[in-house]
Structures are given as structure tokens and as C-alpha cells.
Image (tube, rainbow, N blue to C red):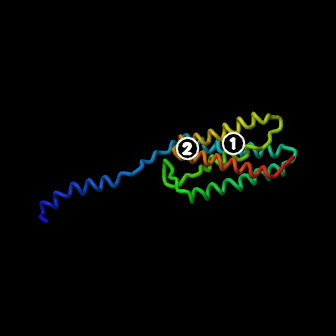
């Protein structure tokens, strides 16, 4: 191999290095305002559930329901994020399921004295849905990841309701 032929391969080598440096799937930057608001909306249902449980006729029983709901759903979400390979759109790490969406569902099924069931469900699902939507807008999760989080949170609520307080 001559010195001239070595210099001829240099541009090809440089091009190969640049091409290999391009990520296969470009990551989207985190949208800060949506990320920040999603932290606030995720706690609306759990906080409301605690308040309503404390105001109810059997606060100990209703708080136990909430504790079971959270104990089933939240650790499961974090374990699944370490087991299921589902990259986040924004950054490193797996995002399946969205723990924010899971947490946003906890407390949804708590009775609200003086409020209709329809009103409680409307506000509760709007809150959980807003959290899920904000996680997508923030580029923290995909649609599949937030839907899985909502489903896991709903499953946690069902588990908590296995204790009957009536």
C-alpha cells in the first residue's frame, strides 16, 4: 500500500466516524414546563383520596384501601421500569410503565361524601389523563408507556377496593 492510497482512504474513514456518531434514534429534549406540571398533577388523586378517606365514616378502612392500592401499583411500576426494555423518548432509561401515570390513578376510587360518583370520576380521570398527557408532551414517555401506567394504577385501585369498607 502506497502513501498516496493511504491518504485516499482517509476521507472515507472520517466519513465513517461521523456517520457512526449519529444516534440511530434522536432523543427529544425534555419540555421543562410540562415535566414540572406533571409532578403536580400526578399527586391530585392520591392527595384527594387521603383527604376523602380521612373525612369518611371509616377513615382507617379507607386509608388501608389507599395503602394497598399504592403498595401494589407503585413498586410494580418501578420494578417493571427496570425489567421491560422500552426507551424513553427524551433520555436514558426505560419508561415502561409511566410511574407518574400510575400514581395519578391512586385514590381515584375513594368515595367523596357530598359529591356524586360521576363528578368524582370525571375529575379523577381528567387529572390522571392530564398527567399522562403532560408526560408525553414533556417527552418523558410514549403513548404506550403512559397507557400502561394508567392501567397499572387502575389495577392497584382494584386491589385496594378488595377491602370493603361498607
Q: Residue at x 74, y 49 (%)?
A: 158
* Residue topped by disc 1: 44
Q: Residue furthest bottom?
A: 1
Q: Secondary structure at mark 2?
A: helix
Identify the image quadrant of residue 17. bottom left
Instruction: Name the side, left or right, on which 55 lies relative to 44.
Output: right
Classed neighbour count for the residue bearing mark 1: other residues with Cα under 10 Å, few (<14), some (14–19), many (≥20): many
Disc count in the image?
2
Q: Residue at x 74, y 52 (%)?
A: 159
Q: Of the numbered discs in the image, which one, if any, rests on residue 143? A: 2
User: The N terminus is located in which quarter?
Assistant: bottom left
Residue in front for this viewpoint, 158 or 12: 158
Residue in front for this viewpoint, 37 or 114: 114
Q: x%, y% of residue 76?
A: 65, 56
Q: x%, y% of residue 154?
A: 69, 47
Q: Secondary structure at mark 1?
A: helix
Residues at discs 2 and 1 in contact (Cβ within 8 Å): no
Amino acid at each position: 500500500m502506497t502513501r498516496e492510497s493511504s491518504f485516499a482512504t482517509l476521507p472515507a474513514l472520517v466519513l465513517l466516524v461521523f456517520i457512526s456518531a449519529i444516534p440511530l434514534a434522536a432523543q427529544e429534549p425534555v419540555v421543562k414546563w410540562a415535566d414540572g406540571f406533571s409532578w403536580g398533577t400526578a399527586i391530585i388523586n392520591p392527595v384527594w383520596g387521603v383527604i376523602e378517606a380521612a373525612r369518611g365514616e371509616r377513615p382507617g378502612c379507607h386509608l388501608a384501601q389507599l395503602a394497598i392500592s399504592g403498595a401494589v401499583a407503585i413498586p410494580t411500576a418501578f420494578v417493571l421500569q427496570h425489567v421491560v426494555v422500552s426507551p424513553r423518548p427524551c433520555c436514558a432509561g426505560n419508561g415502561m410503565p409511566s410511574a407518574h401515570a400510575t400514581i395519578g390513578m391512586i385514590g381515584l376510587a375513594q368515595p367523596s361524601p357530598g359529591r356524586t360518583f360521576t363528578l368524582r370520576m370525571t375529575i379523577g380521570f381528567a387529572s390522571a389523563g392530564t398527567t399522562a398527557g403532560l408526560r408525553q408532551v414533556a417527552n418523558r414517555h410514549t403513548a404506550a408507556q403512559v397507557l400502561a401506567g394508567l392501567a397499572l394504577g387502575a389495577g392497584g385501585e382494584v386491589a385496594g377496593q378488595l377491602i370493603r369498607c361498607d
